[in-house]
Image (cartoon, rainbow, N blue to C red):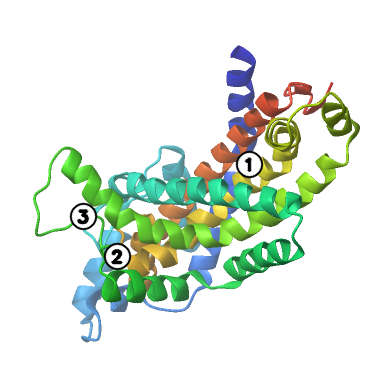
Amino acid sequence: MLSSAVFIVRRLLQAVPLLFAVMTTMFLLLELAPGDPIQAMVGEFPVTPEYRAQLNERFNFDAPVWERYISFIGNVATLNFGHSFANSRDVTALILERIPNTLLLTVSGLVFAAMIGIFMGVLASTSKSPFGRTSISTLALAGYSMPAFWMGQIFIMIFALWLGWFPAQGMTDLRARNVGFDHLLDVGMHLILPAAVLALREVGIITRITRASMLDAMGQDYIRTARAKGEPEHSVIWGHALRNALLPVVTVIGYGFGFALSGSVLVETVFGWPGMGRLLYDAIAMQDNAVILGIFFFIACTVVLANALTDLLYTWLDPRIDLRKGASK
């Protein structure tokens, strides 16, 4: 337990230069981007010189780039991302309010993708039917290829509008005042469609990686030994081969967390899910750079932490791995 905590702290400290590089790059890219944040703030209405001068003084828009960069880096160290002029709120408080909704959607989508993807990958590697193997591989490739925003609209049209099984928009029914279990059920019903769309791409990747890893594991000597000892085939597949085949799958799921977070921007926008992705979409439209930089910082931190937790899972799946050396004993 102590070595795991030391490993997590060491990985977080090693991520500091990476976070510094990411935030510097994002700051410079946003500075080079065309557009006028003051004009975006007022829309198509003309901006008077007096009003422009007032906003420049309030939000420090007319300060030199190097001066705003130094102020920005200093504020990031204290998790202070400034003020959102589009929402008239503190950026950090705004992001912290949306993070639980995005994590609920992302983690649900990844759990769903892991369960379905691993099951389909095992079936594809052990099925004796060529049609079954081809069908699963084709479904996995189709799920990986289809754009999330397009699938989101298809799901809404079929399952929400035609069949009426699930709500089409939002996180809760605003007309109902549910509490307790009814509230959880309401959130769960709103969660199913966006989580399923977010999981589709990851299902395709996990299925293909699980299939390849299982085919390699099934040819190893310990599998032949287990069969020679008379163990049932389901025990050989699920108890011996799958556990050893999970290492690359865990790697894919861990790295897929970052893609799922970025993919949540489109999914949350399509389904009206009140998370960081929807907030980022609105901030880009309004050129609210403080919110954009704050969201990218929290996404980068979450990806670093997810990768560190992925490495910890390795030690559970393969006790030979030594976190202090980063390799098998």
Cα separation, mark 3 vs mark 1, equals: 40 Å
- Residue at image position (49%, 68%) is 31
Residue 74 located left or right of residue 37: right
Q: Where residue 260 sits in the image (x, y, percent)?
A: 51, 55
Q: Which residue is mark 3?
A: 172
Q: Which residue is mark 1?
A: 17
Kind of element beneath mark 1: helix
Cα separation, mark 2 vs mark 3, equals: 10 Å
Question: Which is nearer the eye, 77 or 94?
Answer: 94
Q: Where residue 1 sits in the image (x, y, percent)?
A: 59, 14
Question: Which is nearer the eye, 11 or 91?
Answer: 11
> Which residue type carries mark 2?
Gly
- Residue at image position (41%, 37%) is 78
Kind of element beneath mark 2: loop
Q: Which mark identifies residue 272?
A: 2
Looking at the picture, does residue 67 appear above or below residue 40? above
Q: Which mark identifies residue 327?
A: none
